[in-house]
Image (spheres, rainbow, N blue to C red):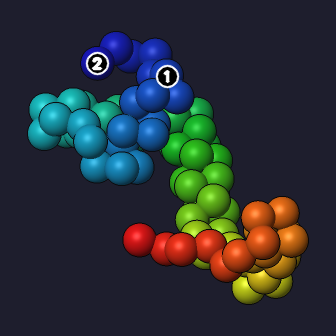
Amino acid sequence: MEDNYTEKEFIKYLYHELTPLEEEKFNQRLGEDFFLQENLENFRKTYDFLDSFSENPHPSSVSLILEYSLKKFGSKPVFV
């Protein structure tokens, strides 16, 4: 991994996808580089923000889709 880290390396770091050697180098550099620390903190805030979103659709959205399907196709959808 280079000294100039890209978005890809920050994301891999947050998702624990760096090799042990890459992570060791990143952590070492992190302890020495305030700019790198700030960048990582910004990525971490974004990561936490995105993680806070619900993964399930709102029940009213599901109801509207089912109602539309019933009107459009004349029967209830079959789930397999």
Q: Is residue 29 left or right of residue 41?
A: left
Task: Point out residue 70 in the picture as x, y percentages from the top left corner.
Answer: 79, 74
Residue in view at x 54 percent, y 74 percent:
78
> Pointer 2: residues within 10 angstroms few (<14), some, or many (20+)?
few
- In the picture, the disc for residue 25 is none
> Pointer 1: residues within 10 angstroms few (<14), some, or many (20+)?
few
Pointers 1 and 2 in contact (CB under 8 A)?
A: no
Residue in view at x 40 percent, y 30 percent:
9
Q: Between disc 1 and disc 2, whose residue precedes? A: 2
Q: Residue furthest left?
A: 20
Task: Point out residue 36 in the picture as x, y percentages from the top left corner.
Answer: 51, 35
Q: Amino acid at mark 1?
A: Thr
Name the quadrant of the N terminus. top left
Given residues 34 and 45, the one toward you in this image is: 45
Q: Quadrant of residue 52?
A: bottom right
Vertical side of 50 occupied by 19: above or below:
above
Q: Quadrant of residue 32?
A: top left
- Can residue 61 be seen from the camera position used here? no
Tell me the CA gap for discs 1 and 2. Answer: 10 Å
Residue position for label 2:
1
Q: Secondary structure at mark 1?
A: loop
Residue in view at x 16 percent, y 35 percent:
19
Residue position for label 1:
6
